C-alpha cells in the first residue's frame, strides 16, 4: 500500500512512543536514560524516512490526508525541532522517574503536528491539532512540584481549550456554508462563504483559534507565562514546534480553503501582524527574565511571519516558510541555552529560583563558552544580523512586501527589527562584557551537541540559503496553485 | 468575489452579523424578565425543603473526592470507547471485502488500548490505597 510508505514517518514516531512507554514501565530510574536515546533514534529514523519521500505527492484515505511539498517541509521542521528537544531532554530528564511519560508525550505531540501538516480535511486537522495540544499541556506542567510550571500548564490548558472551542465553532460555520469539511472542496464551494456574512464570522473564529497557538497579539496572553514557567526544553518545543503547527494550519485553511475571502483576510492580518510585532518587541525591551524576553520576541516573530498572509504573493509565502524553518533553529536553540544555564545554576544551588534571570547570564562567556557563543549566534539571528538565517529570511519576506507595494508594512517591520536589536544585544552584553561570578562549568554532552547542531543549522541557512529558499518556494507553490 | 473593494458593501455585509449579535445578547435577559413577570411566585416554607421524599442534606456540598475515582472514570471511558468502536466493526467487517484491512485496523487499535491498560496497571492506578 502506497499510504503506508508515505506515512512511515508518522508510524515510526507512534511506534517509538508506544515502545518507549512500554519499556519505561519495566525499567528502574537509573536505566531510564536509554529511553531518551530510543526516542531520539525514532525521531531520527522518521526524519530520514521523510527526507526519502521529499518530493512525494499524493492524496490518501478518501481525500482526508495529503502528502506534498508543503507537508514534507513542515514535517521536517517539526522533526528537526523535536530531535533537538529530545536530545537535550536526555540530560534534562536524568534521574527523573517519569521519563517514559515525558518522551511519549513529546513524540505524540510531534505526531499531532505532523498530521496537521498532512491534513486535507478540517476535522482531521482539528483532531491532530488536539493531539499535539493535549500532549503539550501535560508537558508544560511536567515539573509537578514547581508551582510556576503548574501555573503555566494551567494557563496554557484553559486558554488552549477555549481556542479549540472557537476553532471548532468556526469550522462548524464553514461546514454549514460550504457543505463539506474537505479543504479543496471548500475552496470550490465557496460561493456561500462569500455571500453570507457568516463567512466573516467563521474567519474571525478561525483566526482566533489559530491565533492562540501562533500567539498573535490579542491572543498572546498565555505565551509569556507558559514559556517562562514550563521547563526550558518544553518551551523550546512550544515556541519552535507548536507555534509552527498553528502556522501550517492557518496556511492550509486561509490560503486554500478560504482563499475566496482574501480581501477580508488581508485586512485582518495586516492589522494583527503590525500590532503583534510592535507589542512583542516593545514589551520584550523591559524583560529581565530571559525566557520571558524570548517569549515576547517569539510573539514579535509571529508578527513578521504573518506578513505572509497580508501579501499572499508566492515570494512572500516563500519568505514566510523560510522564516519558519530558520525560526525553528534559532528559537529552539535560544530556549535550549536557557535550559543549559538553568542546569548550571541549579547544579550550584538546588533551591535557586528565577534561574533564567538576566543576572545569571553574567560572564557566561567565561563560564560556558559553547553556550554563550551559541546564544550570541541565536540572538543575532533572531535580530536579523547578516550571515545568519534570520537575516536571509527577513530579507526575503520584507523585500516581497516592498515588491507587493506595501512599503508602509515593510517600514514598520524594519523599524521593529531595529528595536529588537536592543534587547538581543543586551543578552550578549551580559554574557561577554560582565565578569563571571562563578567557576567554569562544562556543558553536559547532550546539551552541547544540540546547541552545536542548532548553530550549524542557523549558519548554513545564512551562508547558503539558495537550496532552502528553492525548497520553500516549492512548498509555497502548493498553496498558490490550488 | 468582489474584485474592487467597496467599503459600503463590506459594512453592509456586517449588518446581519450585528443583528445576530444584538439578538443574541438581548434575548436571554428578555426571556428572564418575561419569566419574572409572568410566573406565579409562592414563597412558602415548603419550597426551600428537599424535593419530595429526598433526604435532608447533611454537611457541605463541597467535599473532596478521592482522586482515585477520577482514574477509574478515565479507565471506564477508555473501555467504553473501545466497545463503541468494536460494535460497528463487528457489524460491517464481513461481506464488504474489507475483512483483512478491518481486522488489521481493529487489532492495531486494541494493541494501543492494551498498552494503555498495561501502563495503568503497572503504575498502580488500579490499586485502591486506603490512607
Image (cartoon, grey):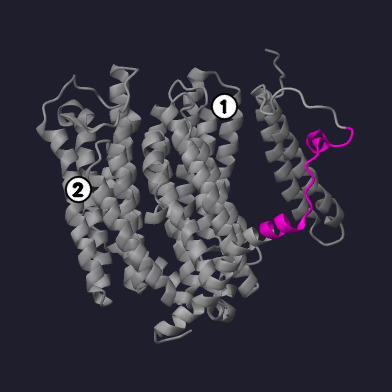
Can you see residue A84? no
- The residue shown at (71%, 44%) is B109
Picture quadrant of residue B34? bottom right
Residue A179 location, x and y as percent?
A: 65, 73
- The residue shown at (48%, 18%) is A30
Picture quadrant of residue A285? top left
Query: Which portion, as a residue range, is magenta?
Result: B32-53
Q: Mark 2 = which residue?
A: A380
Residue A329 location, x and y as percent?
A: 32, 48
- Tag count: 2
Disc 2, SS: helix
Residue A354 location, x and y as percent?
A: 31, 28
Disc 1, SS: helix
Q: Mark 1 = which residue?
A: A24
Measured Cα–Cα span from mark 2 to mark 1: 40 Å
Can you see residue A286? yes
Amino acid at each position: 500500500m502506497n499510504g503506508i510508505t508515505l506515512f512511515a514517518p508518522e508510524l515510526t514516531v507512534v511506534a517509538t512512543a508506544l515502545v518507549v512507554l512500554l519499556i519505561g514501565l519495566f525499567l528502574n530510574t537509573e536505566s531510564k536514560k536509554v529511553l531518551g536515546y530510543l526516542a531520539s533514534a525514532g525521531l531520527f529514523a522518521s526524519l530520514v524516512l521523510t527526507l526519502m519521500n521529499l518530493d512525494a505527492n499524493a492524496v490518501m484515505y478518501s481525500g482526508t490526508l495529503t502528502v506534498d511539498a508543503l507537508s514534507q517541509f513542515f514535517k521536517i521542521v517539526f522533526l528537526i525541532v523535536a530531535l533537538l528537544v529530545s536530545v537535550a531532554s536526555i540530560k534534562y530528564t536524568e534521574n527523573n522517574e517519569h521519563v517514559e511519560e515525558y518522551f511519549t508525550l513529546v513524540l505524540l505531540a510531534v505526531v499531532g503536528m505532523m498530521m496537521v501538516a498532512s491534513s486535507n480535511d478540517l476535522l482531521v486537522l482539528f483532531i491532530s491539532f488536539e493531539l499535539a495540544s493535549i500532549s503539550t499541556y501535560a508537558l508544560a506542567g511536567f515539573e509537578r512540584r514547581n508551582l510556576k510550571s503548574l501555573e503555566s500548564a494551567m494557563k496554557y490548558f484553559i486558554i488552549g481549550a477555549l481556542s479549540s472551542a472557537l476553532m471548532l465553532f468556526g469550522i462548524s460555520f464553514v461546514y454549514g456554508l460550504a457543505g463539506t469539511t474537505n479543504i479543496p472542496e471548500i475552496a470550490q464551494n465557496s460561493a456561500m462563504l462569500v455571500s453570507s456574512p457568516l463567512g466573516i464570522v467563521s474567519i474571525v473564529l478561525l483566526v482566533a483559534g489559530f491565533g492562540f497557538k501562533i500567539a498573535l497579539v490579542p491572543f498572546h496572553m498565555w505565551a509569556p507565562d507558559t514559556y517562562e514557567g514550563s521547563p526550558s526544553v518544553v518551551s523550546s518545543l512550544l515556541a519552535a514546534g507548536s507555534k509552527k503547527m498553528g502556522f501550517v494550519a492557518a496556511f492550509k485553511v486561509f490560503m486554500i480553503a478560504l482563499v475566496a475571502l482574501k480581501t477580508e483576510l488581508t485586512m485582518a492580518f495586516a492589522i494583527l501582524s503590525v500590532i503583534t510585532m510592535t507589542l512583542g518587541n516593545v514589551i520584550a525591551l523591559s524583560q529581565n527574565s530571559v525566557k520571558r524576553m524570548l517569549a515576547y520576541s517569539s510573539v514579535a516573530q509571529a508578527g513578521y511571519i504573518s506578513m505572509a498572509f497580508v501579501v499572499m504573493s508566492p515570494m512572500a509565502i516563500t519568505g514566510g516558510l523560510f522564516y519558519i524553518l530558520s525560526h525553528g533553529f534559532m528559537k529552539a536553540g535560544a530556549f535550549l541555552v536557557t535550559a543549559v544555564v538553568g542546569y548550571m545554576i541549579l547544579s550550584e544551588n538546588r533551591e535557586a529560583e528565577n534561574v533564567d534571570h538576566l543576572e545569571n547570564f553574567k560572564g557566561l562567556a567565561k563560564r560556558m563558552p559553547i553556550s554563550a557563543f551559541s546564544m550570541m549566534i541565536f540572538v543575532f539571528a533572531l535580530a536579523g544580523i547578516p550571515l545568519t538565517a534570520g537575516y536571509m529570511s527577513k530579507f526575503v519576506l520584507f523585500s516581497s512586501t516592498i515588491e507587493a507595494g506595501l512599503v508602509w508594512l515593510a517600514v514598520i517591520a524594519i523599524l521593529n527589527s531595529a528595536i529588537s536589536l536592543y534587547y538581543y544585544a543586551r543578552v550578549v552584553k551580559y554574557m561577554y562584557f560582565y565578569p563571571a561570578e562563578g567557576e567554569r562549568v562544562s556543558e553536559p554532552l547532550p546539551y552541547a551537541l544540540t546547541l552545536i547542531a542548532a548553530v550549524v543549522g542557523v549558519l548554513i541557512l545564512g551562508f547558503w540559503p539558495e537550496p532552502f529558499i528553492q525548497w520553500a518556494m516549492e512548498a509555497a507553490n502548493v498553496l498558490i496553485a490550488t | 468575489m468582489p474584485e474592487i473593494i467597496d467599503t459600503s458593501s463590506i459594512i453592509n455585509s456586517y449588518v446581519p452579523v450585528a443583528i445576530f449579535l444584538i439578538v443574541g445578547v438581548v434575548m436571554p435577559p428578555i426571556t428572564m424578565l418575561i419569566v419574572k413577570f409572568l410566573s406565579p411566585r409562592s414563597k412558602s416554607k415548603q419550597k426551600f425543603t428537599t424535593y419530595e421524599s429526598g433526604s435532608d442534606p447533611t454537611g457541605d456540598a463541597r467535599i473532596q473526592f478521592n482522586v482515585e475515582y477520577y482514574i477509574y472514570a478515565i479507565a471506564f471511558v477508555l473501555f467504553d470507547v473501545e466497545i463503541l468502536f468494536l460494535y460497528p466493526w463487528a457489524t460491517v467487517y464481513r461481506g464488504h471485502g474489507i475483512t483483512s484491512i478491518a481486522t488489521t485496523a481493529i487489532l492495531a487499535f486494541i494493541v494501543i488500548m492494551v498498552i494503555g491498560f498495561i501502563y495503568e496497571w503497572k503504575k498502580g492506578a488500579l490499586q485502591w490505597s486506603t490512607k
